[in-house]
Amino acid sequence: MDRVCWNPIEQLDWKEARKVQEQKLATQLRYLAERSIFYQRRFRAAGIALDAIRHVEDLERIPFTTKQELRDSLKEGPPLGLHLAADPRSVLQIQSSSGTTGSPSYVGLTRRDIETWSEMGARVYFANGFRPGDVCLHAFSMSKGFVGGVPVLQILLSMGVADIPVGADAGTERLLRAAFDQRPNALTGTPYFLLYLGEKAREVVGVDARDLWVRKISVGGEPGGGIPSVRQKIEELWNADVREMCGGTDLGCTYWAECEDKSGMHYLCPDLILVEIIDPATGEVQEVCPGLKGELVYTALEREASPLLRFRTGDHVEVTGTDCRCGRTGYKIRVVGRTDDMLIVKGVNVFPTAIKDVVASFEPRTTGAMKVVVDFPGHSTQGPLKVRVEHGDSVKGGELATLKADVEKKLRDALSFRPEVELVPPDTFEKPGVQKVSLIERVPVVGEG
Ligand SMILES: [Zn+2]
C-alpha cells in the first residue's frame, strides 16, 4: 500500500500527539535547565520552578523569547550565543538567516539536529508530493548559509530524492539549462522566482517551461504559493502541481506544508516543535479553530545546539482548517504576513502581502506586481496609504481610471484602509531573482535630513 505521509505521527490523534509533546517538553526543559546559560538566567529571573511546568498549558507561565534577545545573546556569548546548549565541538553545521534588520543571525546544529531538521523537511516535501526516486532542480539560493540551500539538499537526500544543486545564485540561464539537460521532474524555490524562471524558458532553452519535464513544484521562502492566482500562473506555466511550504531558520528549515488538498499548510511536526498561536497584542494563547488569526510561537522539543522556548516568530497566520481528507491530523495555516512588514494605517493592521493578494486578483488587468510606498517614518500612518500597481498590457485610456477605482474599492472593502492607487506601466518593478521581492518602497520623508 502507498504510504499516506512520511511519518505516522502526522496522522496521530491530537490527544495522543499532546501526550508525546508533554513527555518531550519535560525532557527538553530539563536539558535547558542543565545546559543553557541563557534559559538558566531567564528561569531564575522569572522565578520559575521547572517541575511546575507539567502540561503544555503551563508553558504560559514562561516568558517569550524574542528575536532581539537572541541577537543580544549572540553578541554577549559569541560565536553562537548564550543560548548554545551543546558542547561547541559537537556543532557540525552553522546556518544563517538574512535578518530583515540587517546583520545575519546564526544557528548551530549537532549531528542529531541535522537529522531532526531532515526528518521535519522530509515530512514537508512528502506532503508537497515529492517521492523517493524523484529528481529535483534546486532553485533556492545555495549560498550565504541560508536554510533553502544545504539543509534543503540534506532533506532531499535523506528521503531518497536526487538534488541538482544549481541554486538561484547561478542565475536563470544556468538553472533552465539544467532543467533542459537533466530533465528533473521536481523543482523547489521561491514562488515569484519560479514564475520568472518559467517565463524565461523559451528564450533560454528554446522550449516553453510546460514542455520541460517538471511536474511537481514546492515553493516557500516567501508568501505567494498560497495566493490562488499566483499558484495557478505557476501551475499553467510549468504544467505542474504547485504546493506551498514554510518554516524558519531559528527552529529548523521547513516544517509546515500543503498536502494534495492545497488548502493551507499542515502542522506536521507536533513531536518536534510545539506551536502556540497567540494574540500578538496581548500575548495570550488562542484556541485553534478555523478562521483564527494570530502569531506563531515555537518551542523546540528535540533540539540540542540552539534550543528555543516560546520563541515569538513575528509570523502572522490564519488557521484555514482543522481536518483534512488527506488523513493528517495537524491543523492548516496560511501565512498572512510578518510583524516586521506590518503597517498600521489609521490604527488598522495592514500587511503588504495582503495588498498584493488583492492586486493579483485583478490579473490580467494588472500584472500582479505592486509596491506600497512608505513615505512616512516607522510603520504607522494616518493614511491614505499609497500603492503603486502595474496595470496590464492591454489596459488603455479610460479603462485606467476604472481600474484604479476598482482596485481602490476592493482594497478598502477587503482590508479596511483607505488606499491611493497609482497605476504604472507593466515592467516598472524589478523582476524577482535571488533576492526576495520587496513589496515596500521606502521614500525619503519630506522635511527629514
Ligand atoms: Zn491534508
Image: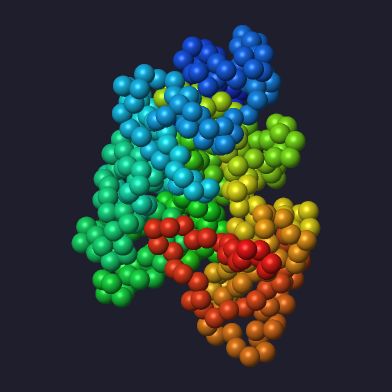
**Residue sitting farthest toward the front:** 449
In the rendered view, does 405 fall on the left or right side of 155?
right
Residue found 70% across the figure and 82% down from its top: 402
Percent coordinates x, y for residue 406 in the rendering: 71, 75
Q: Is residue 406 visible?
A: yes
* Screen quadrant of the N terminus: top left
Please indicate, yes or no, whether residue 19 appears anywhere in the rendered image: no
Name the quadrant containing residue 182. bottom left
- Residue 383: horizontal and vertical position, in percent? 76, 64
Residue at image location 53% in from the left, 13% down from the top: 33
Coloring scheme of the render? Answer: rainbow
Instruction: In this rendered view, identify the residue nearer to me: 244 or 58.
Output: 58
In the picture provided, is 54 more to the left or to the right than 113? right
Relative vertical location of residue 435 with respect to residue 78 in this rendering, above or below = below
Which of these two is toward me, 162 or 81? 81
Q: Is residue 187 above or below residue 410?
A: above
Residue 347, x across and y down, in percent: 78, 53
Quick one: quadrant of the C terminus?
bottom right
Callout count: 0
Residue at far bottom of view: 397
> Is 130 on the left or on the right of 285, as rendered?
left
Work out whether residue 381 or residue 402 is closer to the camera in this orientation and state it. 381
User: In x, y percent, where is residue 443?
Assistant: 60, 66
Q: Is residue 148 left or right of residue 349?
A: left
